[in-house]
């Protein structure tokens, strides 16, 4: 990147410890950010900061299956904050501006949540435990209905039920500022602090007003399917965002920023929320530029000061005057495979994996992980590289699937009826890096008799895999095209659990479900070792996904921008945008 100050961090440094709960490093970072904001420098503070990301913003609801693979988490972390946020080390960090969450005595895991007494939405309606109740109802999977084929499916199109499905009940009074959350017996969820986190609590009063259901708490407690179906219909689709077509009354904010406007020409404009009770945003206006904005033109004309994209995904960037960090993210780039159509038989999925140059792809496109600054393939689905059990789990691949094995791939194809399948690979385009990955897969798999087609497009969504429009998705953890992942393995595990919204390939294995459920509550190292190893043996055999490498991120801050801190997680660089100051 000509003219930029570029640094690179290896996976070994980034994953130096597993931060399920952020430690002193994040606290120090937050303190430093605060100190920087208080500094005065010569020059003029610019009132607007532009922030470019590599995902689309299609919904306000980051918790739906569509929202989780959009840029909603990156755009709205400081618009809809929660009891925690995902910090730079990948773990949940308490946000006491929203409230507190503390374990209380009980026969099972019991947590008392207390909202800040001053917490209020930008439309003047106080935050309340109704918001927690709605989050639980939507993400728990407890409310179901029959679809047109007579199959029982969740009412709420939630991306994941992780943690929320383990809650037995929430005791709260509608409008109250506190709630007691009691988990099911023997379900001591390891990652419980990530529940009710940034972007996960949607405004329950908006749902109540729109559906004519005055008491969301009572509706959930009564479990009336007809009433809950009305709530689910709104939650699933009413917060869709179309440039130029927002009814802002449906989009109140609970954080330091609120939405002012959204248009193709003007981007997603966030402005200071005058009802915010915490520290005022250091910069009053942030403009988020989603994918499909002309990033190079906006960098050139000075309307982008912060950039967070996958390395190599935006060609021709001239980042003169930017401090650039290329860093491994917590997201694993992977092929997510269908379990129907051409890939209905696991042998077909193994054949595809066998012809891929995984190690070469990792070296060419992945984040540096070795002592020589080289990149290695990601060999697990569930276990992060800094885990004590990673090596044992990764060794289950036993040297297979590293380099193309044309003979083994052809032999696997011989087990099925179609010895020369065509595999359509979709991804959110344009993306020259992913286009090159698909081209490399096509070249490597052709000798085995597999034809690979690149069907990436600007209209692509991972739901096309479920609908049979593509055979594979090229994306990051849980099919997210942009910033993704945390230090915990929760998101990655649940994306392979049956019936989960982010399981776009519809993979189902009863034993994997049992393992996911046990790993979510049992942190004993012996259990983690045994179950993670067993899971990887199953997954390398059934091949619902093909992990490639840890996605490299290019995160850039314009010279003169204060308090910019790299965050290679699902939160992205905008995790602390309310502390940014740009002085020119």
Image: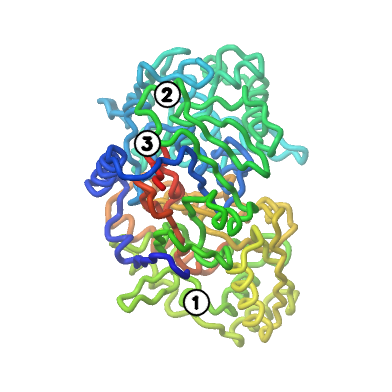
Q: Nearer the viewer's eye, disc 3 or disc 2?
A: 2
Q: Sequence order check: which comes first, mark 2 or mark 1?
A: 2
Please tell me how crowded label 2 is: few (under 14), some (14-19), or many (20+) other residues with Cα within 10 Å: many
**In contact (CB < 8 Å): disc 2 and disc 1:** no
Mark 1 → mark 3, Cα distance in angstroms? 36 Å
> Is residue 399 positioned above or below 305 on the image?
below
Q: Nearer the viewer's eye, disc 2 or disc 1?
A: 2
What secondary structure is found at the residue carrying circle 2? loop
Residue designated by label 3: 84
Quarter of the figure with residue 64: top right
Q: Residue at x 27, y 26 (%)?
A: 104
Seen in the image, is 562 located left or right of residue 415?
Answer: left
> Is residue 233 positioned above or below 559 on the image?
above
Number of the label disc, if any, that sits on residue 247: none
Q: Residue at x 42, y 77 (%)?
A: 398
Seen in the image, is 579 located left or right of residue 419?
Answer: left
Q: Residue at x 74, y 57 (%)?
A: 468
Number of the label disc, if any, that sits on residue 276: 2
Please tell me how crowded label 1 is: few (under 14), some (14-19), or many (20+) other residues with Cα within 10 Å: some
> Is residue 408 positioned above or below 74 on the image?
below
Number of the label disc, if any, that sits on residue 364: 1
**In contact (CB < 8 Å): disc 3 and disc 2:** no
Front-most of 470 and 265? Answer: 265
Q: Residue at x 74, y 72 (%)?
A: 422
């Amino acid at each position: 990147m000509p003219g930029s100050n570029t640094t690179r961090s290896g996976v070994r440094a980034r994953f130096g410890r597993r931060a399920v709960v952020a430690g002193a490093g994040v606290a120090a970072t937050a303190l430093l950010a605060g100190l920087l904001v208080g500094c005065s420098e010569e020059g003029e503070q610019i009132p607007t900061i532009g922030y470019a990301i590599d995902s689309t913003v299609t919904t306000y609801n980051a918790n739906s299956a569509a929202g989780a693979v959009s840029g909603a988490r990156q755009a709205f972390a400081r618009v809809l904050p929660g009891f925690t946020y995902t910090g730079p080390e990948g773990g949940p960090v308490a946000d006491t501006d929203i409230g507190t969450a503390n374990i209380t005595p009980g026969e099972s895991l019991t947590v008392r949540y207390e909202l800040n007494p001053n917490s209020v939405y930008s439309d003047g309606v106080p935050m309340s435990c109704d918001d927690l109740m709605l989050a639980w109802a939507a993400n728990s999977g407890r409310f179901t209905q029959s679809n047109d084929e007579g199959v029982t499916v969740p009412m709420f199109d939630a991306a994941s039920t992780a943690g929320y499905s383990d809650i037995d009940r929430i005791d709260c009074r509608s409008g109250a500022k506190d709630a007691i959350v009691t988990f099911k017996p023997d379900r001591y969820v390891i990652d419980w602090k990530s529940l009710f986190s940034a972007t996960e609590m949607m405004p329950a009063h908006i749902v109540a007003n729109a559906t004519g259901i005055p008491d969301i708490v009572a509706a959930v407690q009564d479990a009336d399917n007809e009433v809950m179906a009305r709530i689910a219909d709104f939650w699933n689709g009413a917060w869709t965002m179309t440039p130029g077509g927002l009814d802002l009354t449906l989009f109140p904010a609970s954080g330091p920023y609120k939405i002012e406007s959204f248009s193709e020409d003007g981007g997603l404009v966030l402005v200071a929320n005058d009802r915010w009770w915490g520290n005022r945003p250091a910069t009053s206006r942030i403009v988020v530029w989603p994918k499909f904005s002309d990033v190079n033109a906006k960098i050139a004309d000075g309307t982008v000061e912060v950039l967070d994209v996958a390395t190599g995904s935006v060609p021709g960037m001239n980042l003169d005057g930017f401090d650039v960090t290329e860093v491994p993210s917590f997201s694993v780039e992977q092929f997510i495979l269908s379990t129907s159509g051409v890939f209905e038989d696991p042998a077909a999925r193994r054949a595809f994996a066998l012809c891929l140059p995984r190690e070469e792809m990792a070296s060419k496109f992945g984040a540096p992980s070795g002592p020589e600054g080289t990149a290695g393939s990601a060999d697990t689905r569930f276990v992060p590289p800094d885990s004590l059990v990673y090596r044992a789990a990764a060794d289950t691949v036993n040297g297979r699937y590293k380099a193309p094995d044309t003979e083994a791939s052809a032999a696997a194809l011989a087990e099925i009826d179609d010895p020369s399948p065509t595999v359509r690979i979709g991804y959110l385009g344009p993306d020259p890096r992913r286009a090159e990955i698909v081209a490399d897969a096509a070249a490597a798999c052709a000798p085995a008799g597999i034809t690979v087609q690149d069907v990436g497009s600007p209209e692509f969504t991972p739901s096309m895999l479920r609908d049979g429009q593509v055979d594979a998705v090229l994306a990051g953890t849980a099919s997210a095209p942009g910033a993704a992942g945390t230090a915990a393995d929760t998101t990655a595990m649940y994306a392979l659990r049956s019936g989960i919204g982010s399981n776009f390939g519809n993979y189902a294995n009863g034993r994997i479900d049992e393992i996911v459920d046990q790993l979510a509550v049992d942190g004993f190292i012996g259990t983690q070792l045994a179950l993670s190893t067993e899971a990887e043996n199953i997954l390398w055999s059934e091949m619902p996904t093909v992990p490639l490498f840890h996605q490299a991120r290019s995160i850039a801050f314009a010279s003169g921008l204060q308090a910019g801190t790299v965050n290679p997680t699902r939160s992205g660089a905008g995790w602390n945008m309310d502390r940014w100051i740009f002085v020119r």
